[in-house]
Image (tube, rainbow, N blue to C red):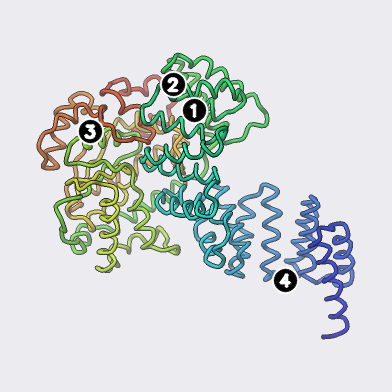
């Protein structure tokens, strides 16, 4: 080592000591002096940028990080540091690119992987967040905050079982952590296991009786369990005690019609909209809550204004061209000969899957509720296991344009494993009934694979007036990412692709499929019910006519609609909003 190198190392050591001791002014001076003599020292610029960032001068920090990368564009720490600065400036997409660059240079860079996962989550790109967070945990599993982020991403991707496992492992370390208990309870609730969800929230409230999040979640479970009297007592008490809590008012918007409190809830929600510091997620929740309440009192112009405002805050991520290409790839890849040539053999006469598919808000929840009222049918809700199984098969490198080659390349062993994994899921959630209903609407895109894996499966495709269906989607604040719902042109594109794909499946699918029209069910519930049971080769069961007495949990956005007898007020509902939805009407008629 030369004398010059020794001098540089000594000065760097002293500067780093200042930084580690949080003596930031001294550290800044030390690094500036180093860089006066050694202006091409990439690590020095990176550390100066770190100091500037901690001092709050983000502009200076960004300049220093850029100088670091000018000196050495292969310095992973430089890309990571620049990403931190960009993230602090609210430039999430730019930060995502720089963190990705750091990880590409050094795949084992734990902090960069965590940062990349965190930014993906902030951008609601939950699926993309999984890989970097998994990498970080594989290198160092003892990272509770990273495990929590990973659990959040799993939950947002619909991988409920895996997310519960992650959070329960954390609870082994932190058994009295109320936030973790609430996360598990929330997942059980989304999984339709309201009994375990309620136990979680009751446990959380025993630890911290005033925890607002736990109280709100507990009230929501009471609502879903139809324990309305207790739910109203609890929410009214909170509404009085927490006048500035937006979540309290939003939850009350689902219950206020039961005790004639809607006007005071509307007044409070509208007051929140005047707050200049209102966050985007809160504004979205308020707008959809006000839209629902105004719609209920037939103030349609005002309702549409709120729905439009809420959707505008969520729009912008749907890619029409990519969606068109994906549907074309499915059609190209899943021909009749390929599906029949790969099809597995029927394996058993119980736990046979029934896939209820369609566009969201087309009546899938109603149909499942009717079917599950039969003693030989179990309603499993919206299972995400087919999504997970296919994703795991494809791996992280799979691209949509490879779908057209997918079915031909399936190995028999892979197909058997996928079928066995899914059937295991059905066995875990059901009680030995002949049929198990999976009503994840989006499974319509996976019917080719479903036909290969399950030759004994039955498909029920739910259809409703397209304008009513799309408008109902537009009026619902769905959880998770549904990027096609927030813009009318996007909705039209999505719906037409659904129609295109279902027409193809009707022509080529080697397993039985029937269409059930929502309007026909409303007009002739008994007749359509008999038709469905004949399709399933089941004896008639009059319980399906009293589906609203079924005590199974329904936690989708259609919860309220299946708690009472069939009604016709949702038919041609779009006419109340005709003057506002010309793009929808025109697009769907072409």
Residue 562 falls in image quadrant:
top left
The local secondary structure at tag 4 comes to loop
Left or right: 311 as drawn, with respect to 586? right
Foreground of the two, 281 or 65:
281
Spatial CA span between label 2 and label 1? 30 Å
C-alpha span from label 4 to label 1: 53 Å
Where residue 51 sits, quadrant-wise, is bottom right
| CA–CA distance in space, label 1 to label 3 | 28 Å
Q: Residue at x 42, y 60 (%)?
A: 399
Which residue is located at x 75 percent, y 61 percent? 65
Which residue is at the front of the view, 544 or 396? 544
The residue carrying pointer 1 sits among few (fewer than 14), some (14 to 19) or many (20 or more) residues within 10 Å by Cα, namely: many
Which residue lies at the image location 38% right of the left edge and 61% below the top edge? 392
Disc 1 designates what residue?
Answer: 251
Q: Which mark is residue 579?
A: 2
> Label 3 near label 2: C-beta < 8 Å?
no
Answer with mark 1 or mark 3, whichever residue precedes in sequence: 1
Dots 4 and 1: beta carbons under 8 Å? no
Q: Where in the figure is residue 57, as x and y percent of width and height?
A: 80, 51
* Mark 4 or 1: the one toward you: 1
Q: Is residue 69 above or below residue 286?
A: below
Q: Residues within 10 Å of mark 2 (few under 14, many from 20)?
A: few
Name the N-terminal-most of marks 4 and 1: 4
How would you rate the neighbour count of disc 4 (Cα within 10 Å): few for under 14, some for 14-19, many for 20 or more?
A: some
The first of marks 2 and 4 along the sequence is 4
Q: From the viewer's perspective, is residue 364 above or below residue 519?
A: below
Of tags 1 and 3, the one toward the viewer is: 1
* Rendered image: mark on residue 370: 3
Q: Compare marks 2 and 1 and give the one earlier in the sequence.
A: 1
Q: Which residue is mark 4?
A: 72
**Which residue is at 52% across, 42% downward?**
316
Which badge, 2 or 3, comes first in the chain's sequence? 3
């Amino acid at each position: 080592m030369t004398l010059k190198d020794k001098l540089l190392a000594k000065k760097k050591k002293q500067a780093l000591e200042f930084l580690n001791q949080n003596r930031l002014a001294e550290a800044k001076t030390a690094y500036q002096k180093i860089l006066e003599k050694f202006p091409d020292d990439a690590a020095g610029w990176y550390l100066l940028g770190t100091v500037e960032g901690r001092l709050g001068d983000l502009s200076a920090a960004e300049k220093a990080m850029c100088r670091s990368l000018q000196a050495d564009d292969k310095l992973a720490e430089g890309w990571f540091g620049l990403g931190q600065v960009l993230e602090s400036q609210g430039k999430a997409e730019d930060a995502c690119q720089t963190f990705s660059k750091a990880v590409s240079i050094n795949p084992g860079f734990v902090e960069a992987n965590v940062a990349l996962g965190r930014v993906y989550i902030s951008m609601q790109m939950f699926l993309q967040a999984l890989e970097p967070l998994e990498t970080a945990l594989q290198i160092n599993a003892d990272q509770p905050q990273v495990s929590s982020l990973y659990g959040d991403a799993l939950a947002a991707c619909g991988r409920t079982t895996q997310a519960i496992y992650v959070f329960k492992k954390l609870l082994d370390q932190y058994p009295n952590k109320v936030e973790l208990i609430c996360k598990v309870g929330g997942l059980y609730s989304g999984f339709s296991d309201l009994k375990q969800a309620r136990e979680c929230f009751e446990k959380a409230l025993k630890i911290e009786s005033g925890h607002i999040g736990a109280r709100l979640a507990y009230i929501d479970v009471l609502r879903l369990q139809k324990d309305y009297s207790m739910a109203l007592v609890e929410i009214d008490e909170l509404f009085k005690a927490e006048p500035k809590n937006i979540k309290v008012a939003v939850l009350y918007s689902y219950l206020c019609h039961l005790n004639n409190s809607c006007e005071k809830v509307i007044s409070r929600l509208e007051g929140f909209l005047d707050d200049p510091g209102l966050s985007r997620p809160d504004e979205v929740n308020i707008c959809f809550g006000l839209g629902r309440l105004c719609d209920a009192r037939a103030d349609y112009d005002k309702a549409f204004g709120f729905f439009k405002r809420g959707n505008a805050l969520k729009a912008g991520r749907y890619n029409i061209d990519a969606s068109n290409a994906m549907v074309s790839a499915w059609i190209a890849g899943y021909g009749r000969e390929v599906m029949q040539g790969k099809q597995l053999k029927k394996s058993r006469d119980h736990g046979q899957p029934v896939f209820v598919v369609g566009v969201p808000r087309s009546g899938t929840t109603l149909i499942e509720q009717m079917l599950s009222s039969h003693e030989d049918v179990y309603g499993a809700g919206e299972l995400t296991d087919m999504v997970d199984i296919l994703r795991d098969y494809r791996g992280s490198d799979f691209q949509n344009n490879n779908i057209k080659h997918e079915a031909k390349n399936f190995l028999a062993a892979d197909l058997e494993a996928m079928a066995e994994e899914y059937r295991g899921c059905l066995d875990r959630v059901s009680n030995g009934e002949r049929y198990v209903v999976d009503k994840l609407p989006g499974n319509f895109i996976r019917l080719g694979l479903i036909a290969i894996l399950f030759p004994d499966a039955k498909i029920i495709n739910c259809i409703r007036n397209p304008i009513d269906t799309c408008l109902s989607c537009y009026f619902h604040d769905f959880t998770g990412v549904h990027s096609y719902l927030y813009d009318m042109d996007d909705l039209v594109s999505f719906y037409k692709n659904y129609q295109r794909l279902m027409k193809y499946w009707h022509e080529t699918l080697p397993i039985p499929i029937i269409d059930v029209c929502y309007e026909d069910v409303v007009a002739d519930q008994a007749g359509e019910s008999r038709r469905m049971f004949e399709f399933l080769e089941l004896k008639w069961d009059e319980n399906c006519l009293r589906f609203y007495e079924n005590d199974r949990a329904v936690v989708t956005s259609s919860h309220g609609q299946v708690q009472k007898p069939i009604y016709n007020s949702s038919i041609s509902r779009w006419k109340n909003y005709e003057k506002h939805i010309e793009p929808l009407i025109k697009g769907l008629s072409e």
